[in-house]
Amino acid sequence: MHGARLSLLVGGLVVILSLIMGVSLGLFAGYIGGLVDIAIIRIVDIMLALPSLLLALVLVVVFGPSIVNASLALAFVALPHYVGLTRAAVLLEISREYVTASQVIGASALRQIFINILPNCFATLIVQASLGFSNAILDMTALGFLGMGPQPPTPEWGTMLSDVLQFTQSAWWVVTFPSLAILLTVLAFNLMGDGLRDAFDPKLKQ
């Protein structure tokens, strides 16, 4: 329970950072288009071609193992998902009549992006953020297990598992309870993500 504070804090921090940066890049890529769109999407494609955990591990090794560096690395590798989703939603919304009408009456680009388009992208982003929360917890646990996350004596589920593996047969509970905490937390956020997806999708409301 003590280790849950850090794991949940890191999960929330990673989601907030990646959501802010990813949504901003996706909005400008989809609305501005042209070379800006091409450059952002090519970088996103390169990042998606690499395993996210491996990329995060490389970044932590380069900058040094710590809770801050691990959180920033996980936020960076989560960016492509938010950029792609936001860009796709912007391209869908930008062709709608209300956006065209707003342009006709002289709305500025910032008003179009943040007042007219962004609120209509929230449904998809909220679902992705809830699922990204569980992914962030799993990835931080993996980094902690490999010794690249929070350093002892900081309580964190991955670090706990790494420290007590040699006691698996003699003291099963020291491995079981951190593992159950990870399992139940990730399962809860995945189920919440599925529920939000069903709630926001009109086709699934029946």
Image (tube, rainbow, N blue to C red):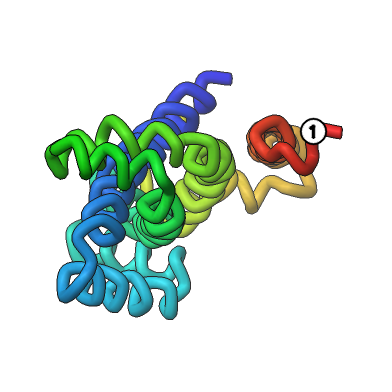
- Residue beneath the point at 57% across and 39% down: 127
Front one among 49 and 150:
49
As drawn, the residue found furthest toward the right would be: 206
Front one among 78 and 157:
78
- Residue beneath the point at 58% across and 20% down: 1
77 lies left or right of 2? left
Residue 132, percent from left and from top: 51, 45
Q: Is residue 42 above or below residue 91?
A: below
Q: Is residue 138 above or below residue 160?
A: below
Residue 200: tell me if it is visible.
Answer: yes
- Residue beneath the point at 36% across and 69% down: 55
77 lies left or right of 131? left
Tell me which amino acid carries mark 1. Lys
| Secondary element at image label 1 | loop
101 lies left or right of 106? right
Q: Which residue is mark 1?
A: 205
- Residue beneath the point at 44% across and 66% down: 52
Q: Would you identify the image quadrant in which residue 25 lies?
A: bottom left
Q: Is residue 93 above or below residue 91?
A: above
Q: Would you identify the image quadrant in which residue 197 lies?
A: top right
